[in-house]
Image (cartoon, rainbow, N blue to C red):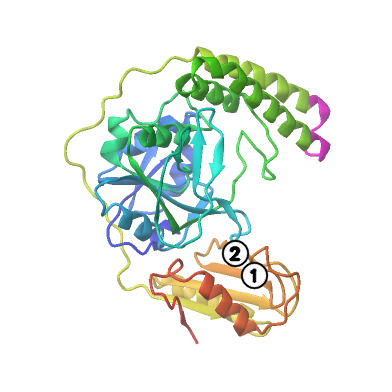
Amino acid sequence: MAIAQLDYDRFETVVVACPKGVGVAKEFATVRVIGFDQPNISASRNLGVDAASGDVVAFIDDDAIPEPTWLHHLAEGFADPDVAQAGGTTLGRNGISVQHGAALVDATGQSHEVHMGEEAPVVLTSTLDRHPRLHGTNMALRRAIVQQHGGFDERFAFYLDETDLTYRVSRSGGTTLFVPKAVVHHASGPSRFRGSDRTPQDVFEIAASAAVFHGKHCASEMRDSAREAFLTGRRRWILRHMQGGGLPPDRAAHLIRDLTAGYKSGQTRRAAPARLWATGEKPVIAKSIPHAQDLYLVATGRSKARSHAEARALVAQGHRVTVFEYRPDARYHRVVFTDEGYWLHIGGIFGREDRSEPLFRASTRQNRIDQTLARLAGIRSKNPYLLEVKT
C-alpha cells in the first residue's frame, strides 16, 4: 500500500513471496508477483532482478515501509553515470530514530558507521581496508551491474547477502552514493530467525553466512581471527538475551552450539555456476499518482474519530495523508503507517520526538507539528513546505 503511494513518475513493483505473501500481493493489480517458497533471501532477490524491466532495481523488505519520496531521491543519484549503487536512511521501530545510515564494511563483514553532517547526497569513499556497503531494505543498484557481478551469492541464505554484493561492487570501483533523504521505516518483523522483540530464534544461517563472507573476502591469515571474533561476539549476544529473560538457558545453549555448526557448514559451501539472466524486452507495469496531494490533518480529543475517518476517505481518493495526534502530555513520539494507508504521528506536545531532546519541553501543539514538518522537509513530500492542511 505504501509503495503504491510513492511519488515517482514511473516504476514497477515486483514482489517475490511465499504463498501467503503471494495472496496479499495479488490484491494489488499493478504488482508483478513471483511465488518462491524457499528460505533463501539471495535467491529471491535474484528472481526479482531477473524479472525487473528497469535499468535500476531498488530493494525493500516485507517488514519495511518507504516514505513517499524514497524512489525519487534514490533515482536522482543515477543521473550520474558513474553511480553504481545508492542507499538511504533506514529508521527503526519508533519511526524517528536512525537504525542504519551510511556505512563502510571490512573484510570480516563488520560494519563501521560513517557520520553524515549534511542532507545532500554524498559519495562514500573507501579507506585502506574498508569499502562502502548498503542495507538491503533501502538500496538501489543498476541492474546491469548486479548481473555483471553474478547477482546475489545464494550461499547467503540469510544475513550479509546485500553486504557481500555491495562490497564487491565497491571494491571493483563502482561509485556508492548515500542519499540521506531516501528514507525507509524498518520494523524488523518476526521471522524464523528472530522474535518480534528481536530475540534470536535460529543462528545457523547467520553463522554460515559469516563463514562464506570470511572465505570470500578475508586473507587466509585473517580467517581464524575473524572466525573467533564472530563466534565470540555472537555468543555474547545470545547470552545478553538470556540474561535479559528473552531466552531460557537451555535454548541459549542450543543456539550457541548452532553457531559452531552453522559456521562449519558455511565453510564447505561451494559457489553456484554462473547465472544465466533473462534476455529480451519485458513489459513494464508503471505506477504513478499524478493527481495525489500531500495533506495533513490534526486529530484532537474532540475531532479524533472524525479526523481518522477523513484520512481514510482521502486515501481512498488517492491522496497521501498524515495525521498528527499530539496530546497534552510528555509521551515519546512515534510514527506508524496504518493499515488504512495513512501516516500517523503519535506523542505528547511536551515529549521527545528526536531522542536527544529534553524529556520535557514547553510547547504548543502547532509548534510541535511545525517541528515535525521541518524534520520531514523533502521526505514526506517533494515540496519543501511539505503538506497542505486539510480542514
| Amino acid type, mark 1 | Ile
The residue carrying mark 2 is 335
- Residue shown at 57%/76% (left/top)? 371
| Amino acid type, mark 2 | Val
Q: Nearer the viewer, residue 237 or 254?
A: 237
Q: Nearer the viewer, residue 276 or 27?
A: 276
Is residue 250 visible to us here? yes
Question: Position of 252 compared to 187: left or right?
Answer: right
Single out the residue that lies furthest toward the left.
280
Residue at mark 1 to residue at mark 2: CA–CA distance: 6 Å
- On screen, 68 above or below 189? below
Disc 1 element: strand
State which quadrant residue 33 falls in.
top left
State which quadrant residue 49 falls in.
top left
Picture coordinates of residue 380, whole percent (x, y): 46, 68
Contact flag, marks 1 and 2 (Cβ < 8 Å):
yes
Q: Which mark is residue 128?
A: none
State which quadrant residue 351 falls in.
bottom right
Picture coordinates of residue 264, whole percent (x, y): 59, 14
Which stretch appears magenta? 242-250
- Residue shown at 41%/58% (left/top)? 70
Picture coordinates of residue 236, whole percent (x, y): 74, 31
Question: Position of 273 compared to 389: left or right?
Answer: left
- On screen, 43 above or below 388? above
Q: Earlier in the sequence, mark 1 or mark 2?
A: 2
Question: Position of 247 compared to 343: left or right?
Answer: right
Is residue 228 part of the magenta span, yes or no?
no
Single out the residue that lies furthest toward the bottom.
391
Picture coordinates of residue 203, whole percent (x, y): 64, 27
- Residue shown at 21%/46% (left/top)? 283
The residue carrying mark 1 is 346
